[in-house]
Image: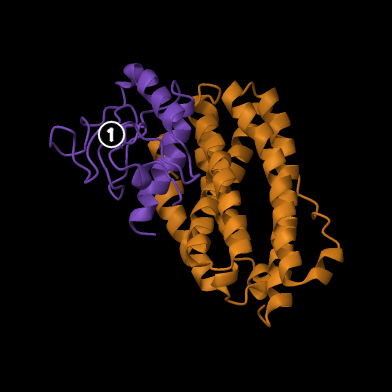
Chain colours: A orange, B purple
Amino acid sequence: MTRDGPAIAAYWSHRAASEARAATLFERLLVDLRRAGAEDVVLELAERAIADEHRHAATCLEVVAHYDPLAVARDHEPPASPEAHVEEEPELRAALHTAAFCCIQESIACAWLDGCLRRAKESVVLEALHAMLSDETHHARLGWAHMASSRVSPATRGHVAAALPDLIRSCIASWVDPEVSRLAIDAPEHGVPHPDATRRLVLAAMDEVVRPGFASLGMAE
Amino acid sequence: MGDRAGRWFHTLVVVGTAMTACGGSTAVDTPSSPDAGRTRAQPVVGTADGGGADGSAAVGPDPSPDTDASAAPDAAAIVAACCGPVGRCKVDDAGAPVCGFSTCCEYCGCIQ
């Protein structure tokens, strides 16, 4: 066991809270997608995503317990999520949230988890990262599937495209959050990448996956 | 990310947009993608070195945003065949990826 166990546990504890928060976000997104008349395949993926994220939170807590059993007793209440775009029509609100949560955040998450997976060595971490990556892929596809569907009107696509700079900026900020960076002690073998590595992976995913993805749908910034 | 970005573009964007095949424009690879120029409507069955089964390059026709009418069957086939990143490429009896991509792990996102 590493002497950095408590610090690694603290990082994974933060991730557990993030995963729990994601479950809440997907619950709200599912409501919006239903109101927007999203296609069945999209709704099915959203339903699955809720359960996935709850499971991820539990998985992260297992990693926490591995590194610091006492840390599990700490509070892991997910922080409140901001109510964004509440004033928008359901179709636009669903599209904006899908673009942010799925197309951007989950696509970044896949590339980031991939990077983490390649550097991890501890078996409990490898298993956790692999399990989460397998699911996050579907969550990102959910976003691209909805954005490409006929249930998102050209006008809505235009609104989303106009909002992309702000969405992308806020999403990047969440990945390089100083509070998160403070917890990252540079222990990639334990699934805790250095903040600089995270920044590189996030920006590369943005430039090589997210932006080309929107551009392929005619939604360039 | 280098060449891995192309894989994620396929795994997430190409496969994702193919799930609702009627939507939007044809998803065309970016220049940085490992099989740039191929549309999602045109999976290529080829060899492990990236070439086509007949020895041709593993690229499809020139992208045309107005030719998506024939995309649905192939796009659906990609989605149905893609195993996702679970570390188990689906292959046929000859060992070729059933998703139709030339090198499965480069394109479908399997995490080996």
Q: Residue furthest top?
A: B69
Q: Quadrant of residue B91?
A: top left
Query: Is A90 drawn above or below residue A112 in the view shown?
Result: above
What residue appears at the point 73 percent right and 44 percent down from the top-left corner? A23
With A43 as the anchor, is A113 left or right in this view?
Answer: left
Residue type at numbered disc 1: Ala
What residue appears at the point 58 percent right and 75 percent down from the top-left corner? A187
Q: Position of residue A219 (x, y in %)?
A: 44, 38
Q: Which residue is mark 1?
A: B94
What residue appears at the point 59 percent right and 28 percent down from the top-left corner? A42
What residue appears at the point 22 percent right and 43 percent down from the top-left corner? B50
Query: Is A82 drawn above or below residue A190 in the view shown?
Result: above
Q: Position of residue B53 (x, y in %)?
A: 18, 33
Q: Residue furthest front?
A: B93
Name the residue nearer the viewer: A187 or A152: A187
Q: Quadrant of residue B74?
A: top left
- The subunit carrying tag 1 is B
Q: Residue furthest left?
A: B55
Q: Quadrant of residue B54?
A: top left
Q: Residue furthest bottom?
A: A3
